[in-house]
């Protein structure tokens, strides 16, 4: 049985793709579902949770996704500290923390979201250091596509109106991860992710992606390549309001810098056509 800490779109995706309803969701969101335990806002009461013996694995998919001021950043770190106490109180469970490539040292200085993930990684690494028998993995995916309100899908949806939208630098590289591929590895508790001897794992497709590349692939897969306008946005208030159309409360502080990690040890799926195939099947 799998426990999941944190709600959100990817958690919903995981639950939807489970073969059975044999799961426990630990969340700050009120829900009358018998599979859900409410631990109050910012996981205030998660310290009180004692997992039953039939729960062997736990996915930690919790964070503040849109951090635009220090108070939210502070709340995020407090939440991760509460999760650390929860882990120590349940030492026999296997854990995976879903972090982000934005937590890497090369880019986290530009993003409070990335910095919060980096601090969380350090908190969990300290748990492992002081409690070697606790099994913890840290997973860094790229931008997860294929979820409800996928920002890539929303951006390309403007092509129906003959508009190319560029929310950020068209040439800036970034990594992407398929929600489907990631869920397959997470929901299989015998997968290489769960059984890897490494604590930190990178999970994204090997090919760097740019906004320009996404539009090019859209052209390749659609008979009509015609467009009237190309709209470029800088990071400002108007841009923030507009970007809500592409996915509300998304941290876009990294949208104009190269952020594809410089690692060779990428643990990813064997699906080489991931993002290309996703774009090919959009709007059909």
Image (cartoon, rainbow, N blue to C red):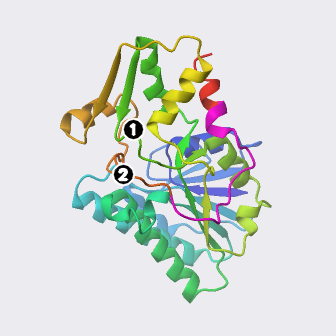
Residue occupying the point 41% across, 42% down: 171
Drawn side of residue 27 relative to residue 114, left or right = right
Main SS of the magenta part reads loop
Query: Callout 1: helix, strand or loop?
Result: loop
- Residue lying at the far bottom in this picture: please name it: 130
Quadrant of the frame with the C terminus = top right
Quadrant of the frame with the N terminus = bottom right
Drawn side of residue 88 relative to residue 196, left or right = left
Drawn side of residue 86 relative to residue 235, left or right = right
Residue 26 image position (x, y, % from top left): 54, 55
Residue occupying the point 55% across, 24% down: 218
Which stretch appears magenta? 261-277
Viewer-closest of 163 and 96: 163
Answer whether residue 26 is visible to the viewer in this image: yes
Viewer-closest of 170 and 239: 170
Task: Classify 160 as above or below 236.
Answer: above
Q: Earlier in the sequence, mark 2 or mark 1?
A: 1
Give the spatial CA distance, label 2 vs label 1: 10 Å
Residue 170's disc is 1
Residue 257's disc is 2
């Amino acid at each position: 049985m799998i426990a999941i800490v944190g709600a959100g779109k990817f958690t919903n995706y995981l639950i939807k793709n489970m073969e059975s309803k044999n799961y426990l969701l630990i969340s700050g969101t009120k829900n009358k579902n018998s599979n859900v335990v409410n631990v109050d806002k910012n996981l205030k009461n998660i310290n009180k949770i004692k997992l039953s013996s039939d729960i062997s694995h736990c996915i930690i998919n919790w964070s503040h996704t849109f951090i635009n001021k220090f108070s939210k950043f502070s709340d995020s770190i407090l939440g991760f500290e509460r999760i650390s106490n929860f882990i120590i109180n349940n030492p026999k469970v296997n854990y995976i923390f879903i972090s982000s490539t934005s937590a890497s040292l090369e880019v986290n200085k530009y993003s409070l979201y990335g910095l919060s993930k980096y601090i969380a990684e350090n908190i969990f690494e300290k748990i492992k250091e002081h409690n070697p028998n606790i099994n913890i993995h840290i997973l860094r995916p790229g931008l997860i596509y294929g979820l409800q309100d996928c920002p890539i899908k929303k951006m390309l949806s403007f092509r129906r109106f003959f508009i190319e939208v560029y929310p950020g630098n068209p040439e800036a590289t970034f990594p992407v991860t398929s929600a489907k591929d990631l869920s397959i590895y997470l929901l299989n508790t015998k997968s290489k992710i769960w059984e890897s001897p490494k604590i930190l794992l990178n999970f994204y497709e090997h090919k760097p992606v740019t906004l320009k590349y996404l539009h090019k692939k859209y052209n390749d897969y659609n008979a009509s390549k015609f467009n009237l306008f190309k709209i470029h946005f800088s990071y400002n208030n108007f841009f923030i309001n507009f970007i809500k159309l592409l996915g509300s409360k998304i941290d876009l502080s990294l949208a104009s810098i190269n952020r594809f990690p410089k690692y060779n040890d990428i643990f990813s799926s064997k699906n080489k056509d991931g993002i290309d195939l996703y774009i090919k099947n959009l709007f059909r």
